[in-house]
Amino acid sequence: MCGICGLLGPDSTEAAIKRMLGLMAHRGPDHQGLWSGEGAALGHTRLSIVDTSPKGHQPMLSEDGKTVLAANGEIYNSPQIRQRLERQGHRFISRSDNEVLLHSYEQSGGAFLPELNAMFAMAIWDSANRRLLLARDRLGIKPLYFCHKGEHLAFASEIKALLSLDWAPKAISPRGLSEYLGFENTFGSRTLHQGIEMLRPGEYLVFENGGLKRAQFWQPGVEEVASLSFDQAVEAYREEVEGAVKRHMMSDVEVASYLSSGFDSSTVATLATGFNPEPLATYCGAFDAGGWYDESKGAGAVAQKIGSRHTTVSITASDFTRVFDDLIFALDEPRMGPGSFSQYIVAKEAARRGKVILTGHGGDELFGGYPVFKFIRLWQEMGTSPRAGLRHMSGIRPSEFPHLAFFYMQQKKAGGRGVFLPRLFSRGDLKKALRPEWASLLAGLDPVQELRELTAGENDLYRLLTRTYLQAYLPGLFVVEDKISMAHSLESRTPLCDNQLVELGLKIPLSLKLDQGELKAIPKTAMKARLPELLYRLPKRGFPTPIGLWFRRDCRAFVEKRLLGKDSRLNRLFRSDYLRSFWKRYQMPGRERLGPLDVLPTHRVWMLLCLEGWLRAAEERLGVELNLG
C-alpha cells in the first residue's frame, strides 16, 4: 500500500512532486521515490508489504526505460498473471505484485485492466507515446484524484497533495456540497472541491496530446441464475469466501483483522486464522457508554473460539475531541457517518503492531444484509400477489416498520425507482439554513442527478439497489477506510469484495439471499459450524457510535464552539440564526431518548461539524481558504 502522485505539463518539477509526497508521507514511510522526464514527473511513497526489498521500490521502470509505473494497491492474482507474462518472454526484477502491472501494459496496453483481481490506483507513463494511463479498481477500494487545466494534469492518492500546487483550483464545489448535504457523500467522480475529480470505480483515464479520454473497464451487472438452489449457493459461497480470504493473506509481513460482533468481520477473522501460521491478531473497539454501543462480548466469543491475540480498544468522549481535527484532515473532505471516528481510533492501535488488516466491508451489500432487501422482496410480491406479499410481512421486525414506511412512501413517490439513501437536508431545509448566495446556488441543483445517471436503464428495484450500493454507497465507505487506515500507515484489505465473490453475489437471486425471510441467509448458513452460536442471537449493529450522547454531554462545549463560535467556518455557508435555532432544538431535554427519531438530527450535527472541520483544516494546515468558486 502506498501513495502516488504525478504531474504532466511545463511545470512538472521535482520540487512540486516532493511537496506532494511530503503531504502523503503517512501513506508510505518505508521509501519515497521520484522519477522525472521531459514534461512529466511521478512520485511514490511506499508501505512495503510484498517484496519489502529495494527491488520493489517505485516508480518502477520497464527494461528499456520508456514506461514508468507508480501504483498503490495489491494484485491478488499476480502469481497467475506473472506466470503467463514470463511464458511470453517478460523478465521480472522483483517479487512485487505491482510489477505485473508494468509488464501487462507493455504486453497489451490498457486491455489488461479487467483481468485484475485487485484493489489499486495506478499511473503508467508511456514516454514513447507521450501517454498517461490512470486507473482505479472495480469497486473503488483505492482512491485516485486528478485535476486538469490547460496543458497541466496532476493526480494523487489524496486531495491535500493536489492543493499544494499553485495552479490547482481551490474552491467549494456547489454540486459536491449539494450531494454531501443531501446524502453525507458525493457520487461518481464528484468531490467537494471544485475542479478536483476522482476516478470512478472501474474507470480508466488516458491523457494524450492534451486531451482526456475516460471510460469504464468494468461495471456491476446483476445476472441472477434462476436454476441455483439454496444448498448450491451456500456451497459456492463457502468455496469462494475461503478462496478470497486466502488470496487476501498474501503478504511478507503480518496480517491482522478487525473483529466486531458482526458476521462479516467474524467470518473473515475465522477463515484468516486457518491461513495464518501464528495466532491471528484481532482488534475491536468498545465505547465507554456500554450497552448497545459495546460489541466486545460477541467479538470476544469469536476471538476465544479461533484463539486469536485479541485487543479491545477503549473509546471515550475525550478521544473524540482529541483526535477530531486529525481525523478530518486525514479524510481530505467530509464523507459518510460518524463510524469513521471509531475506525480511526482502532486503526491507530492496530498500526502500532502491524501494517496490514482485514475488514468485513461488502458482505451486507452483496449478500442481503440490510432490511431494505426484505422491503424490496415485499414490494415485488405485493405487486404481483398481495396475498403472497402479506406472507413476507412476518419477516419484518417491529423496529423495521418505520424504515418500511419510509421505503414505501419513497417508492410510491418515485414510481418504484426511489433512491435508497436517506435524505439528510431537504431542499426546504437548505433554503432556510444556507446564506442567500449559497441557497440560491443550490436551489437549482438536484443532488440525486448523479445517482440517477449511475443507475440509468435499471427498472428492476433489486438491480437498482445493488448498483446503488456498489457504485455509490460502498465507494464512499472505501474512501473513508483508505484515508483512516493510511493515516496510520496501515493497509486495509476487503476480502469480501474479491472479484470472484462479487461475481457470485451478483448471480444469486434475492429469494435465496433472504431464504426463510432471514437476512444474509447464505453466509449465516455457510458459517454455522464455525462461528459461536451467540452471534446468531445478537442484533445487527454496524459499529454504532454514541455521539448523540456525547454531543449533549461531554463534547457539548467543543461542538457548540465549532458550530456557533465567532471563528466558526460555517459562517461562510450557513445563516447564524439557523445554526443557533437548530442547536437549541437539538439540546432540548429528552431528545436523546427518542431513539431512531434522534438519528437524523444527530447526523446533521455530525455533518455540520465535519464541514466546519474541513474548512478549518484547509486554512490552518494547508493555508487554503475554500470559498465559492
Image (tube, rainbow, N blue to C red):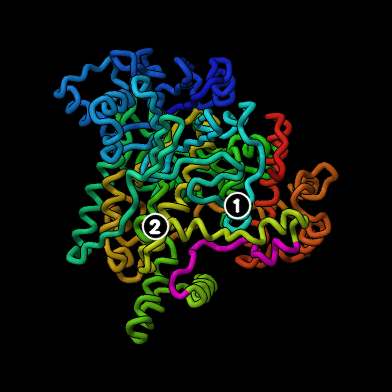
Where 14 falls versus 230 (above or below)?
A: above
268 up-or-down from 100: above or below: below
Amino acid type shown at disc 2 = Arg
Residue bearing mark 2: 467
Q: Is residue 542 magenta?
A: no
Which one is in front, 210 or 302? 210
- Single out the mark in the foreground, 1 or 2: 1
* Amino acid residing under circle 1: Arg
Instruction: Name the residue nearer the viewer: 530 or 263.
Output: 263
- Disc 1: CA contacts within 10 A as few (<14), some (14-19) or many (>=20): many
Where residue 174 sits: x, y (%)? 64, 50
- Residue drawn at x 50%, y 47% is 476
Is 230 situated left or right of 26 in this image? left
- In the rendering, at what x and y percent does residue 103 appear? 27, 24
What's the residue at 52%, 42% (across, down)?
480
* Residue toward you, 418 or 498: 418
The answer to whether residue 290 is above or below residue 429 is: above
The residue that mark 1 highlights is 175
Residue positioned most to the right: 566
In the rendered image, the residue lying farthest to the left is 87
Q: Residue at x 66, y 57 (%)?
A: 442
Residue 421 lies in the magenta stretch: yes
Q: Residue at x 47, y 26 (%)?
A: 4
Q: Position of residue 227 (x, y in %)?
A: 17, 65
- Quarter where residue 416 is shown: bottom left
The one nearer the camera, 182 or 206, is: 206
Secondary structure under badge 2?
A: helix
Task: Identify the element where label 1 is drawn.
Answer: helix
The segment highlighted magenta reads 415-432
Q: How far apart in space, not on screen, are marks 1 and 2 (Cα)?
A: 21 Å
